[in-house]
């Protein structure tokens, strides 16, 4: 903590009206198992300090992987030089926040650092062996296990001093199954904040085998998906991607203000859009960094603001944007702790954490029973959405025909293509089977691919167009 305090004090002595420093150490370890063969193994260590200043109404940022005080002085000088060279017409200000002193960490029942890499590899190899025991024609099997231990020290010129430790675990897999000339592909992504015990919570072998069996059934029994207007029951994975892409992204305040337009895109929601109707009254979509063990769990963001649940769409209306201190000041509100950076050497920007549809009280069976004719899209394989996050397409992976309230045979290539308001307005029932998957969320220039999770319960949409 001495170095971040030194950086902040030096920045103030050089004329910064505000300064913050973030010292970060990361200990990543990951490997790839491709068709049963260990294809790559990486064990790394990365550490450094980033400094951001506000001077002359502009921001400057610089970073170094050296902990020598002379080098820290140099990056502070660089950050101030960058800010003063900006010559902004409109001055940047930060929303007021209280200084906090905090020390938080995510507990580990079994520390990731105590698990030999050989044990981690064997864990995934055993899943791969179980998969091959099905005797299916699998053209490609790809597994990636990664973990990271993230240690941060943060200080700012307002008096905040925060230390945090976040261990994270992730498994991603991709499968390709064949049946004659027919091909079925899938990818799934699971994440955890905590120790090695996370691997047991997933019951990974069971999940992979169930996925492979459903792929095989789709290949051998699947029929063409029906087209036209009908009801759609969408599983947690589909609700999750829709939450992330058509709610989380368009409520990022930097997008709303047009500051990501040439990079990650814009938003269909205008700056004055709080209160705008985007869905039915039963729809509430939240982003919550405090979901226990979710891979994007945190108690304070990278500007030293305490995390809380953010209600993005509440009862069908835009309720709040995701903010950092700069965007909050621009829109005359308070930050809600949404500033995150992928590492010490990039600036924290507005980001999602764990984005999901809030569950209600319907069972999946009840929702299906209420459908005379439609499709149960349990999971997706592909999605696409425009830069404003308005026109979207979701293509099903595991899907089934519904007739007279009963699930029938698998259907293939179900596609729902509609606008964001049409999607959320069509929702008339929300389940209680909340589930999450992990993801990587890309944004900014230089690009930052950050841990995120997305999910929801099963939801039912009435009278939407499938093709």
Image: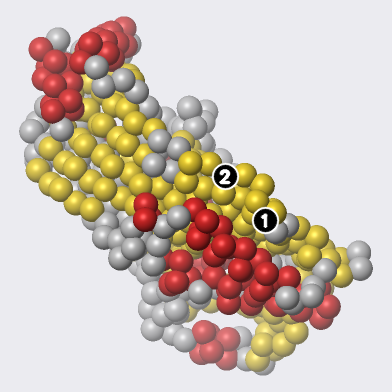
Q: Nearer the viewer, residue 204 or 16?
A: 204
Which residue is denoted by mark 1 in the rendering?
A: 142
Kindly tell me whether residue 196 is visible in this rendering. yes
Here the colouring is secondary structure
* Residue 418 relative to residue 263: left or right: right
* Residue 130 relative to residue 337: left or right: right
Residue 344 location (% of width, % of height):
34, 31
Up/down of 363 relative to 207, above or below: below
Residue 89 location (% of width, % of height):
30, 13
On the rendered image, what quadrant is the C terminus found in?
A: bottom right
Disc on res. 41: 2
* Residue 114 relative to residue 243: left or right: left
Q: Residues within 10 Å of mark 1 (few under 14, many from 20)?
A: some
Asked where in the image residue 209 lies, by quadrant, the reply is: bottom right
Q: Which is closer to the viewer, label 2 or label 1?
A: 2
Residue at screen point 63% across, 91% down: 405
């Amino acid at each position: 903590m001495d170095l971040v305090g030194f950086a902040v004090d030096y920045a103030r002595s050089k004329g910064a009206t505000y300064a913050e420093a973030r010292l970060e150490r990361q200990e990543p370890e990951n490997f790839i198992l491709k068709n049963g063969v260990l294809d790559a193994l990486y064990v790394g260590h990365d550490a450094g300090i980033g400094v951001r200043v506000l001077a002359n109404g502009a921001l400057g940022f610089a970073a170094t992987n050296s902990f020598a005080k002379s080098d820290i002085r140099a990056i502070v000088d660089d950050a101030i030089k960058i800010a003063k060279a900006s010559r902004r017409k409109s001055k940047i200000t930060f929303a007021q926040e209280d200084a906090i002193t905090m020390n938080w960490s995510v507990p580990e029942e079994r520390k990731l650092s105590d698990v030999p890499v050989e044990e981690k590899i064997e864990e995934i190899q055993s899943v791969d062996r179980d998969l091959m025991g099905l005797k299916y024609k699998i053209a490609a099997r790809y597994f990636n296990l990664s973990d990271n231990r993230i240690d941060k020290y943060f200080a700012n010129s307002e008096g905040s001093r925060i230390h945090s430790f976040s261990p994270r675990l992730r498994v991603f897999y991709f499968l390709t199954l064949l049946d004659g000339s027919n091909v079925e592909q899938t990818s799934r992504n699971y994440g955890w904040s905590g120790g090695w015990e996370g691997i047991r919570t997933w019951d990974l072998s069971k999940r992979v085998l169930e996925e492979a069996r459903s792929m095989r059934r789709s290949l051998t029994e699947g029929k063409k998906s029906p087209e036209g207007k009908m009801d759609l029951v969408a599983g947690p994975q589909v609700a999750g991607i829709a939450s992330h892409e058509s709610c989380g992204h368009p409520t990022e305040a930097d997008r709303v203000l047009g500051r990501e337009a040439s990079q990650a895109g814009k938003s269909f929601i205008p700056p004055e859009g709080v209160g705008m109707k985007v869905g039915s009254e039963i729809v509430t979509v939240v982003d919550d960094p405090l979901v226990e063990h979710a891979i994007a769990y945190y108690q304070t963001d990278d500007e030293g603001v305490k995390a809380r649940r953010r209600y993005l769409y509440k009862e069908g209306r835009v309720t709040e944007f995701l903010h950092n201190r700069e965007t909050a000041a621009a829109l005359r509100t308070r930050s809600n702790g949404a500033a995150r950076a992928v590492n010490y050497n990039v600036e924290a920007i507005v980001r999602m954490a764990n984005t999901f549809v809030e569950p209600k009280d319907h069972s999946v069976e009840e929702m299906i029973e209420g459908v005379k004719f439609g499709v149960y899209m349990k999971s997706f394989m592909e999605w696409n959405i425009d830069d404003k996050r308005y026109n979207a397409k979701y293509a099903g992976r595991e899907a089934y025909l519904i007739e007279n309230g009963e699930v029938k045979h698998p259907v293939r290539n179900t596609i729902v293509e509609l606008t964001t308001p049409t999607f959320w307005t069509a929702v008339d029932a929300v389940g209680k089977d909340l589930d999450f998957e992990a993801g990587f969320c890309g944004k900014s220039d230089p690009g930052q691919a950050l841990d995120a999770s997305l999910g929801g319960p099963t939801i039912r949409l009435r009278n939407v167009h499938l093709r």
